[in-house]
Image: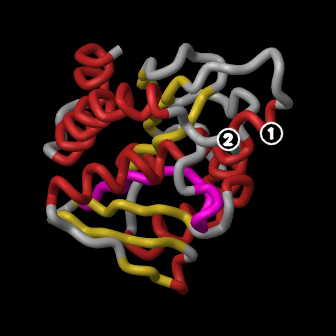
Amino acid sequence: MKKLVVGLGNPGRKYKNSKHNIGFMALDHYADNAKIKFKKKSTLNAEIAEDDNLILAKPLTFMNLSGIAVRKIVDYYHIDNDQVLIIYDDVDLPFAKLRLRYKGGAGGHNGIKSIIQHLDSQDFNRIRFGIDKSQKVDMKEYVLSDFSKTEFKILKDVFIDMDRIITDFKLDINFDEIMNKYN
């Protein structure tokens, strides 16, 4: 059975190290360690990498339209919603805090809102990555700002946990067990 892990972000150099691109960054880390490469698939509006039964996807539709790519990928590979895992940033969590859950609303995240709309369901797995929020900077400006050098050092450790979560998901470990292990 195929499984899909989608990292949310925005395409292009401008956004490469931004807080909003944590999903792309997590998948790049996993792919580097697994020695697999992403290939642009225009028909799916995404960059895709395959690791046995696992499909990794970075939508190229920009964050707010992520659901368009996710729908195409799910249909193309015939993947059930409960076999989908979305990685995205969350301003309501402290920096570097991971929160796994199955189901739920968008919580104000436009990428998730788009996915819920295009899948016509809230039933999919998620890894929310805390990026904190700034009281001083406009929200849009904040999420599109780059991580600091100090934050990058912390990210390296968190990516190791994310790699483990993705591996457990790939190995078909029940998502409740994965949540209990990492929440």
Taking the spot 25% from the left edge, 58% from the top edge, the residue there is 31
- Which residue occupies 57% across, 26% down? 131
Camera-nearest residue between 145 and 73? 145
On screen, 152 above or below 136? Answer: below
| Percent position of residue 101, x then y | 45, 25
Viewer-nearest of discs 2 and 1: 2
Residue under numbered circle 2: 145
Picture coordinates of residue 165, whole percent (x, y): 25, 34
Amino acid bearing label 1: Lys
**Residue at disc 1, secondary structure:** helix
Total numbered badges shown on the rendered structure: 2
Tag 2 secondary structure: loop
Residue 57 as seen in the image, left or right of residue 171: right
Residue type at numbered disc 2? Ser
Find out whether residue 2 is within the magenta segment: yes
- Where is residue 81 shown, x and y percent of the image? 45, 49
Q: Which residues are magenta?
A: 1-15
Whether residue 144 is in magenta: the answer is no
Image quarter in which the N terminus is found = bottom left
Which corner quadrant holds the C terminus? top left
Q: Nearer the viewer, residue 104 or 59?
A: 59
**Looking at the image, which residue is at 40% across and 54% down?**
80
Q: Is residue 175 above or below residue 65?
A: above
The residue carrying pointer 2 sits among few (fewer than 14), some (14 to 19) or many (20 or more) residues within 10 Å by Cα, namely some
Return the residue at label 1.
140
In this image, 112 relative to 168: left or right?
A: right
Q: Is residue 27 left or right of residue 47?
A: left
Q: Tell me where residue 175 appears, x and y as whole percent.
A: 30, 30
Q: Quadrant of residue 64?
A: bottom right
